[in-house]
Amino acid sequence: MINPTLLLFDIEGTLHVAGQPIAGAVGALGSLRQAGYLIRFITNTTTKTAEQLQQQLHHLGFVVEAGELLSAAQLARLAATNLANTYGRPIRIWPVVDQAILPEFAGFAVDETKPDLVIVGDIGDGWTWPLINRVFLALQHGAQLVALHRNKFWQTPDGLHVDIGFLVAGFEAVTGQVAQVMGKPASACFAQILAHAGVDAAQALMVGDDLDSDVLGAQACGLTGVLVKTGKFREGQLVGRAVQPDVILASVADLPAWLAAQQQP
């Protein structure tokens, strides 16, 4: 029997797709909150600040309380702060990220030539061969590679689009580095949320549409993984997988009923 106290939710593809709420998602989260579950939102979205993401969810009708949402950019800032403490000096960073989330890195010195950290995020068509080569050279000169996430693809209104995991793998291949990944499925990401909530992994359940980053990543850290068949989910992703999700649901709207059924003798 699965009896969690903490529910973690991916956002894009799980609660909404391109700004349109998944049918029944708002009501489902409302009933789960009323039932007394602790709720956290965890996202690899790197084109909005945590504050913007919270405002977007509020606009869509979801309740998000203070401290319930954690983004990959927030984790990257924490990593940079920890590194500065290790060095015992201010560090130089190069945030190759969307302009919208640059405020998350306020207070750090920016150096695009010889940074201590190169922080890679989503910049869409801003990726060019000259920029890729500049990042490569910075890494060759000793900068550490920090990836806000390494998702393979994401869901858009006109289908799946390749994500920055493609570039992160490329930078690793040409430099020999292993990127420090901030978002899901990094164990540090899940550990940070569990510690903040004061809950053990065995008491937590992760709900998402990304088989690798959301579900299998959570399961590898000891959480229960729930895959929803919305957003980027495709049936073929499950074929031939040695490890399967703990639970598969049509959508997050089905979660309250499934959890209630777990409590039946």
Image: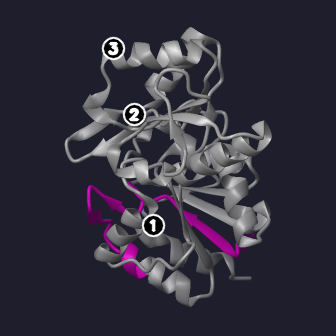
Which disc number belongs to residue 252?
1
Task: Name which residue lies at 27% across and 45% down.
Answer: 156
Query: Percent x, y for residue 89?
Result: 72, 39
SS of the residue under disc 3: helix
Residue tagged 3: 130
Note whether residue 148 is visible.
no
Q: Is residue 132 left or right of residue 260?
A: left
Please, what is the three-letter code of the amino acid marked with disc 3? Pro
Q: Do the residues labelled 3 and 2 touch (CB within 8 Å)?
A: no
Query: Percent x, y for residue 227?
Result: 52, 54
Task: Name which residue lies at 41% across and 45% down.
Answer: 233
Q: Is residue 261 left or right of residue 18?
A: right
Q: How far apart are marks 3 and 2 (CA)?
A: 19 Å
N-term mark: 2 or 1: 2
Which disc number belongs to residue 126?
none
Q: Do the residues labelled 2 and 1 touch (CB within 8 Å)?
A: no
Please, what is the three-letter code of the amino acid marked with disc 2? Asp
